[in-house]
Image (tube, helix red, strand yellow):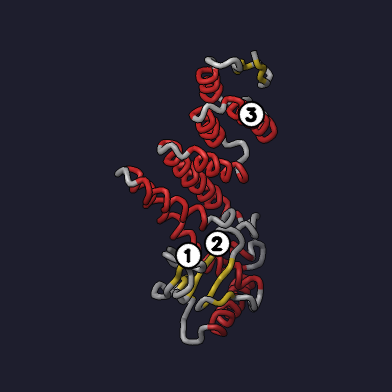
Amino acid sequence: MKPANPWDGHRVGAVMLGSFRLYLDGAPVTDWHGSRGQRIARYLLAHRRRPVPKERLIELIWPEVPPEVGRRNLHQAIYCLRSTLRAAQPDEHHVLLEGDCYRVNPDLDVWCDVDEFEADIEVGRRMTSVGRVVEAIASYRAAEQLYGGEYLEDTPYEEWAIGERDRLDARYAQAVLGMTVLHLDGGATDEAIACARTLLVSRPADETAHQLIIRAHLSNGRRVDALAQYRCCVGALAREFGLAPSEEITALCDQLLSSSATRLTGHGNGHLAAE
C-alpha cells in the first residue's frame, strides 16, 4: 500500500501532473519569492537530469530583452528561488551552477510523480506480458491514481511543456485501457466498464474506450446498453471532431448485434436506425 502522500520521506516532492506543487520535507512550498523563480523551478525539475544553459532560461522567460538585462534578471530570479527553498531547507544546495548552466542538485533526494507514474505503467506492461494479471491491474491502478490532471495544467501556455503534456496524456490512456482490457478478458465486465468510463471523462471521443464498453455489455447480453453506448460514441465523435465512427467499431456492432431483433445499420450521416 502506497502512502497517501508518496513524497513523504523525501527531501523534495514535485507534483507535476495537474497543478504544480512542490514539497520540502513533506511541507508544501507556498511562499515563493517571485513568480519567475517558480517558473524556473518547474523547468529545472522537468529537466533535472541534465544542466540547463543560462541562455535557455533567459529565452524561456525574457525572450525579448537585451542579453545583459536577461542575465541580470536570471541572476535575480535564481537568487529568489534559492531563497525560497533554503527558507525551508537551509542545509541543502538545491540549484547548482555548472559552468554556464544551472541544474537541480543531482545528489538531492527528489520524488516526482511523473517518474513514478511512468514506472507504474512499465510494471503494468511487464506484468501483463507474463500473465500476472493481478499485479498488472494494481500497477495500472497506481498510475491512474497518480494522474492528477494534465501535465502542469496550471501553465497551459508554456510551449516547452505542450509536447510532454500530450505524451503523458497518451500514457494515461494507455494505463486505463490496459487495465480495462485485463478486467474484460478476466470476465470482470462491470470493472471494465467503470475503467473505460473513467477515461471517457477526459477523452469523451476515445473510440477504444467506447468499443470496450460495448464489448462488455455484449458479453453480458446487454444489447440495448451496447446500442446506447454506440450512439454515445457517435455523438461524442461528431461533437469533438465532426467524424463518424470507424469501420471497426461499426462492424463490431453489426456483427455482434445482428442475431438480435435490434440491428445497427450505418447511414452516411453517421446516424443509426433500428431494424
**Residue 129: % across, % down:** 32, 43
Report the side of 260 relative to 243 (left or right): left
Q: Say which label, 2 or 1, has the lower sequence index.
A: 2
Contact between marks 2 and 3 (CB within 8 A): the answer is: no
Query: Looking at the image, which is closer to me, 30 or 137?
Result: 137
Q: Indicate the quadrant where residue 40 lies.
A: bottom right
Above or below 64: residue 36: below
Above or below 202: residue 3: below
Which residue shows up at 60% across the image and 67% down it? 39
Please state which of the two labelled residues, at mark 2 or mark 3, is closer to the viewer: 3
Measured in 3D between alpha carbons, the distance from the residue under mark 3 to the one under mark 1, in whole angstroms, is 41 Å
SS at mark 3 in the image = helix
- Identify residue for label 3: 228
- Identify residue for label 2: 16
- Identify residue for label 1: 112
Measured in 3D between alpha carbons, the distance from the residue under mark 2 to the one under mark 1, in whole angstroms, is 7 Å
